[in-house]
Image (cartoon, rainbow, N blue to C red):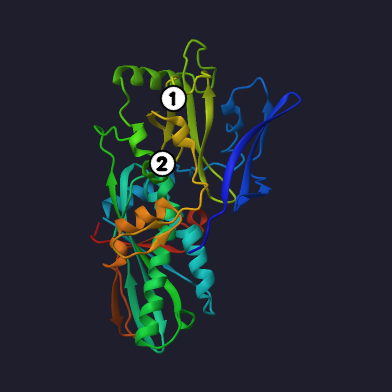
Amino acid sequence: MTRRTQSRYIFDIEENSRVFRHQFFVNGVRRADCTTCESRVPVSEPYHHHWRNDVQDNRGHWIQIGPEEKDILNRIEDQAIEEFILCDGSTAARTNDFLLEAGMDAVPQLLRFLSYGTEKLEATVGFYVDVKKERMYYESSPLNIEHHLDIGEAVDMIFSMLLEKISNYVLLHQRVPLEACVIRRMKVTVKRFCASSKSNSCKLPLQYRVKNAAEVNENGSNKPDLKKLSETYLNQMDQHIPATLKINLYTFRVCSTSKELYAVPYLLRGDDVENTPTFIIQTDVVGDFQGLVEIRNIRKFLRMDTQDRVFECRQCQSHFVDRVHLALHKQISCGRNFMVWHMDKDAIELHENCLPLPKQYFKYDWVGLASKRV
């Protein structure tokens, strides 16, 4: 069990500038300031000017989807493609590098792409493992991902639990450590639950649902006012929101260095944080506005865990320092439903109607396996 680096954000006033800083702490001691998050604007400008260049500077957490990518999504739907294969094309086995690239980049990128236009994803990951002249296939149980900002944490949890299961299995049955295994191929199964026109779901990322569920009213206390407020925000995005609108708005950001999710001010109009209506701006995976979620207790909403706390799973007694990982761990039933199959190492899998995904967009050699002919 490893301890995460804790962090906080602050605003400093330096002469006529307001400076945003994201600071890292280890065991309560400040270690460094994040250079990728630092932002400086004139002190008279609104807070959202700190974040308005995130897309141009490639500091945002959104992806770009154009006509070609939308065409790929349509083909995935038309051919009922739910399984995607990723292979390591290098000549020499490099299991650690392959898993690192897949877990940090390739799989999260694929899931973010597939999350476009959906309410949630159901994802399953499987590894093809060669060890001592045997081949096995290990597969996780399905995990529901209900917000695109949860994808990184979800993939991290699935990979960690899969590798733990593989390590225990090969040590027990083959009497070898995990390092003796070679993994050069994986399969990701994804069911897309597309958003309907009647859906108005606006869920928070799991990190904030878990910590502050009792403090958030997802529908707002007054629906007509909330709808009007959303329309005002959309109409004034590139201009100044009317000064008569006494609200506080926050938005989500993801640190390019630590991949940490945090909420930052977008517009602050009320000094009385307890009584000023406060909302968090919700966007989809491409940055399009989805709605506003009312925050009942902004102090608790923004507060990060800084104390030494350990969360225990009552089912299997596993321990976590992060409530998000505990929640994901519970969602996949402590890994009890993970499966392993023994395969003929010389067997050849043949698939028809495959859809190679463009490498210039995905950077990796993903292939979609169609389940029906077109």
Q: What element carries label 1?
A: strand
Q: Which residue is drawn at 43% across and 19% down?
A: 275
* In front of the other: 65 or 35: 35
Q: Percent x, y for residue 328? A: 35, 55
Pinpoint residue 22: horizontal percent, then vertical percent.
62, 42
| Dot 1 and dot 2 residues touching (CB under 8 Å) | no
Res. 278 mark:
1
Marks 1 and 2, Cα distance to the nearest angstrom?
15 Å
Q: Which element is circle 2 on? A: helix
Q: Position of residue 263 (x, y in %)?
A: 50, 37
What number is the disc on residue 208? 2
Q: Residue at x 42, y 21 (%)?
A: 277
Question: For this view, does 373 lie left or right of residue 361?
Answer: left
For the residue carrying disc 2, how many other residues have a C-alpha within 10 Å: few (<14), some (14-19), or many (20+)? some
Q: Is 11 located above or below residue 159 in the figure? A: above
Mark 1 or mark 2, which has the lower sequence index? 2
Callout 1 environment at 10 Å: few (<14), some (14 to 19), or many (20+)? many
Q: Nearer the viewer, residue 144 or 321?
A: 321
Q: Give above or below for 365 relative to 292.
A: below
Instruction: Name above or below for residue 269 compared with residue 83.
Output: above
Give, as a three-letter code, the residue at label 1: Thr
